Image (cartoon, rainbow, N blue to C red):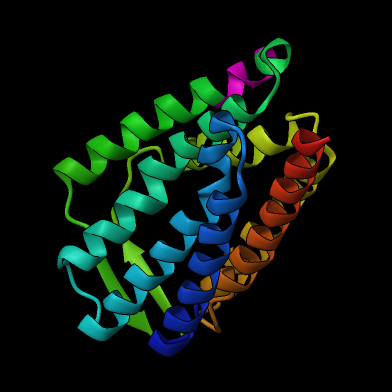
Amino acid sequence: MCWSATADLVAGAGIACVGVACVARTQRTGDLPLAALPLLLGVHQLVEAWVWHAGGGTGPATVAWAVIAFPLLAVWVPVAVLCALPRHSGARQAIPLVSGLATAAALAHSLATRPVRAEIRGHTVGYVIGLPHAGLLVAGYLLATVGAFLLSGDRLLRGLGVLAAAGALVSWTLWRLEFVSTWCAFAAAGSVVVFAWVERRRQAYSR
């Protein structure tokens, strides 16, 4: 989430370009889901630019934003990390993966049965869903996404997990104050980390 339609558009385009570069430079099929994460995040920012342009509301842009942000990312991140890890290291991802699947199922059910509404609040966009057991769902979501990176055993991916945790905290705090939305900056920084990870893998496979 960025602080205006223009910021979302520029950030989304830039992050998506990093994602395309990551995918293009990936040499192992199992690394593709993680390499494509910046592309997904970039598309997400572009969708929010559409939400800004529509003035919020309950239209298709709002629904698309919520589907990517909630159930899709809750599954995508732990699955992507699992695919990228060596086979013998996959056991440590069981908890984030199970948490992601359960959380995504609950979030998908909520999106299918409850309307989601976007509200323009100054330099932020608020998304109103009315989730049941919201605290539990947030904990499950963070365990699936941030936890997958922190438990990966890879230095760069652990750093990405720390960055994601810090970004979530700062962005949530500023969003609660309805001051300015800053998640796009953390998404951009995370995309650079993913690119560095892809480059390191490419060099290792080229030896």
Query: Left of 149 or right of it: where is 131?
Result: left
Q: Main secondary structure of the magenta part?
A: helix
Q: Position of residue 166 (x, y in %)?
A: 72, 58
Image point 57% across, 68% down: which residue? 183
110 or 148: nearer the eye?
Answer: 148
Image point 72% across, 10% down: which residue? 88
Please determine whether, in this image, residue 191 is positioned above or below residue 1.
above
Query: Left of 132 or right of it: where is 179?
Result: right
Image point 37% across, 72% down: which residue? 46
Any part of residue 121 in sight: yes
Q: Position of residue 48 (x, y in %)?
A: 35, 72
Does 94 lie within the magenta span? yes
152 or 146: nearer the eye?
Answer: 152
Please determine whether, in this image, residue 91 is positioned above or below residue 123.
above
Q: Position of residue 189 (x, y in %)?
A: 69, 66
Q: Which residues are magenta?
A: 91-96
Any part of residue 160 in sight: no
Please determine whether, in this image, residue 125 is positioned above or below residue 110.
below
Does 118 lie within the magenta span? no
Task: Say which quarter of the image contains residue 142.
Answer: top right
44 or 130: nearer the eye?
Answer: 44
Task: Say which quarter of the image contains residue 196.
Answer: bottom right
Task: Say which quarter of the image contains residue 147.
Answer: top right
Image point 64% across, 21% down: which residue? 93
Q: Position of residue 204 (x, y in %)?
A: 81, 36
